[in-house]
Image: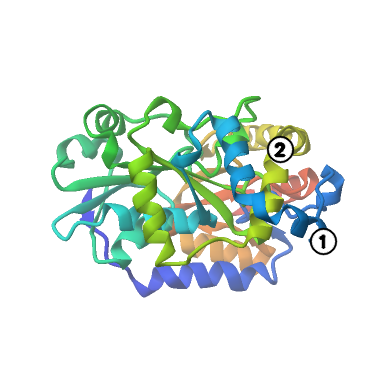
Amino acid sequence: MVIEYKEPDFTQNIFNWIISNSKKCRINLALSGMSEYNPHDFGIETSFSKFMDDAGSVDSKLRETISDLYGVKKDEIVFTTGGSEAIFLAALYFRNPLGRALIPVPEYEPMFRAPHSIGTKTILVNGEEIQQEFNKATDHVLISNPNNPTGSAAISDGIRMVIEDSPEKLFVDEAFRDFSFNKEAYTMFSDHPEIITSVTATKFYGAGALRLGWIMAKKDVARRIQALKMITSGSLPMYSLWIGNQILKNREHFIEKAKGRIERNREQIRSFAKKYGIKATDPGNASFCFIYTNKDGYELSSEIMEKEKILLTPGVYFGLKNGFRLCITGREEELKSALEDISKYL
């Protein structure tokens, strides 16, 4: 499969469908990030007067925290308005009138939409086709790792080839990597300093309201991306950076908060797949898995939403016609109930 991406109205309708149904579902299994929390439970200060005392050093302190966490240099960090802007800025950085964006499917929908929206010829390929299709003179590649929607952290031979031959042409979104619950924070950028990576506080940390993310790239690339950001959305609010710094300093507490629930829910998914003979990706590296079906994913998800009020993300959002992504960040009893109801449709 090698096809040029054409943005259909249907894709936007999927996003609108998810948003509209989120207001009336009883169980939301489309929500891939941890739910919002009370920051005071983690000892996080929110007082605006306290923030004003620290305002002059907020940027430098957050850079220092990220630098210490990931082992990167302070001038290799660019703050972004969440994870979506990071994807857009990477696409903008790579843009070449004669170039192409190669996206191995399945993949997170903004990976297709971002380069396409700025006029880059965007090609959807199977992972094994990267080796045949990739032209180092003109092409670049955008991926997520762990992959969204499968949760797989495996690196395909095609991506490995890009890393070895043209690492400067690869962007990797690492929004869900912390769901591996490693004691030490990790980014592929540490091992491959020519690539570009990004992280967001929205998913693992459940801090979507801050709209805080960050790109990591070598100094000259980071400088260019920062210049692009200044003509797109400008600087982030200092208050978000201030809260974000406190959150990252409490990373171990967030691991403690999420790990037990997520690991128990992972076992529920494995048991569910085994019991019903369902083909499902293992959720061991992320907060979701992908359920493969022979049925149209949008029609199936719509039916389950209509009859059971359970919200899922159809495969078409990720470039797949069949199946759906199922998220496991909710309460264990809710997931158990939802899986029993979903099994009736598979």
N-term-proximal mark, 1 vs 2: 1
Instruction: Give coordinates of residue 121: x percent, y percent.
Output: 21, 59
- Residue name at image x 29 percent, y 45 percent: 141
State whether residue 16 is above or below residue 43. Answer: below
**Please, what secondary structure does the residue beneath circle 1 have?**
helix
Q: Amino acid at mark 2?
A: Lys
- Please state if 158 lies on the left or on the right of 24 as rendered: left
Seen in the picture, residue 246 relative to 13 is either above or below; the reply is above
Q: Can residue 319 be seen? A: no
User: Quick check: can you spot residue 26?
Assistant: yes
Foreground: 193 or 6? Answer: 193
Q: Can you give x and y, in whole percent of width and height, for residue 59 in the image?
A: 60, 50
Q: Residue at x 27, y 52 (%)?
A: 94
Q: Residues within 10 Å of mark 2 (few under 14, many from 20)?
A: some
Q: Is residue 16 left or right of residue 255?
A: left
Label 2 element class: helix
> Horizontal placement of 51 versus 137: left or right?
right
Residue in the image at 42% along x and 29% along y: 154
> In front here: 301 or 265?
265
Residue 16 position within the rendered picture, expressed as x and y whole percent measured from the top left: 52, 72
Name the mark on residue 249.
Answer: 2
Q: CA distance from mark 1 to mark 2?
A: 20 Å
For the residues carrying marks 1 and 2, which lies nearer the camera in this image?
Answer: 1
The local crowd at label 1, few if under 14, some if 14 to 19, many if 20 or more residues have their Cα within 10 Å, is few
Residue found 65% across the figure and 30% down from its top: 181
Name the colouring of the figure: rainbow
Residue beneath disc 1: 49
